[in-house]
Amino acid sequence: MKEKEGFVDCPEQQMIVYVEKEDGQYGPMQTGSYITKNYIEDYFLKRNNLISKLKEQVDREEISPVKLFMVLEDLTVSELSARTRIPFRKVKKHLLPGPFKTIPNTLLEHYAAVFNITVEQLLDVDAGYEQKNDEDASK
Amino acid sequence: MTTIPFNHKMGAHCESGTVTSLLNHAGLTISEPMVFGIASGIFFGYFHKHKSFPFPTFIVRNRPGEIRKNIGKQLGIRFQTFSFPREESGMEKLDELLISGIPVACQVDFFYLDYVPSWERVHINVHFMVVIGKEGSDYIISDSYFPGPVRLPEHSLRKGRFAGGTMSPKGFIFYPAHVPSSSDLRKPILKGIRKACFNMLSIPVPFIGIKGIRLFAKRVADWPKLARDTEHLSHEVMKINILLEDQGTGGAGFRYMYATFLQQAADIVELPELKERSAELMAIGDGWREISLFAARIGKNRDLGTARMKELGDLIMDRAAVEERFFNGLKKSVK
């Protein structure tokens, strides 16, 4: 790729790309992210729609907040189990609203730590994802 | 504690960038593409089902940690490494090394790095960066993905270093304890190229190397069946662009950086043919970049019907064919 073709003006996300310079030598060029520059709004649109859908499922008591944040953070049950150090079968149960209500506080803390939120935000999903949205807006 | 004078430099990739910065700091002049190439960093693997990934994905570099291990072995560099069963001892050791004036590379989960924009943060336990100081309760970080040093609160670094899950960092840190003042790069370059060719052509596993690219090309048509809905499919298809371009690859899934390595290597090993191979790989990289742009476009337009997904698969299949020719040619060049 030629140097001119590779440059993207996106100060929000800088990176190094290797390009062909004018003298034919290959070397690094600091540039911006093409996908962030052109498609970041689409990313947030999809993310907000996903949050709304999952939130509706929580409200209808089809899934638990653990499932909501697990899907949102692109984790599998196996990965969440390994990260929280909670057995796989228990995590699977905790994805359902009924068993979620019986989770002791110590285990809720494990989940909250992995999702990088507080236990209060895990119990009150609105607050949980509002905090995530605030983080997004502040960047 | 103050900050250790350290020449912060952006790098294409976190591990090769971190290792290069530390070696440069220790007095060895070597470029990031040279580190990447000698360490046989170029790779391909496709995972259609994996317990840690909620959706099919692919990798374009060798296993995390291999760059450090391979460059150490090839150039006679001794890296001092530490892992910790307890957080406290891990944080204490880091502080102790910083007080001694040693910049320290840390393995962390990318998700907990507060200085990373939210849309980039994902749970991935194999991000590498250099800690160069501590001011109050903040650590000063030289992260090769950022234009300058950044600050990270102690609690976030702790979370990142001791995250659980697949390839959990376990507080892993390292620094070069012995670096030869100069190295003859000829043998390491040739060895690195041979190993890269082996990895791409000969590993007898159906999802690795050229076979992996072919598998990706075939199985991408199944992605619509695995997605929750169209927006999920769009997100996953657009991630092809991110994995090839944005996640620290130097563009085109490391193909541009490896082409740069081959160009630099040609003069050192006095093998002008490598310059031709280098130009060939640059052109192959352009093809990968077309795939990135195509994936981003069809994802954004939700143009993800059978015909488009087949078109995407065909573009990927074409890369398998050209890379097979390329790596066979490269193998002959360094025989």
Image: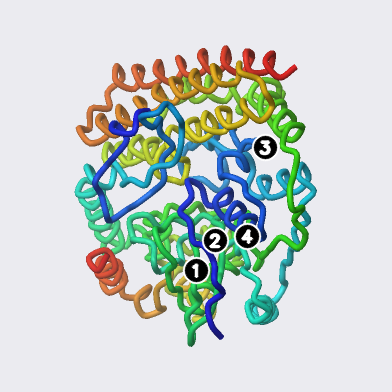
- Looking at the image, what colour scheme do you see? rainbow
Which residue is depicted at the point 68% across and 45% down?
B66
- The residue nearer to you, when weighing B212 against B255, is B255
- Name the residue type under label 3: Ile
Q: Earlier in the sequence, mark 4 or mark 2?
A: 2
Q: Earlier in the sequence, mark 3 or mark 2?
A: 3
- Horizontal side of B187 relative to A28 (left or right) equals right
Q: Earlier in the sequence, mark 1 or mark 3?
A: 3
Is label 4 in contact with label 2 (beta carbons under 8 Å)? Answer: no
Image position, residue B251 (x, y; %)? 42, 36
- The residue nearer to you, when weighing B205 against B230, is B205
Disc on res. B129: 2
How far apart marks 3 and 2 lie (CA) works out to 20 Å
Task: For mark 3, give the secondary structure.
Answer: helix
- The residue nearer to you, when weighing B164 against B28, is B28
How far apart marks 1 and 3 lie (CA) works out to 26 Å
Please state the chain letter of the residue tagged with numbered disc 4 in the rendered image. B
- The residue nearer to you, when weighing A138 against B223, is A138
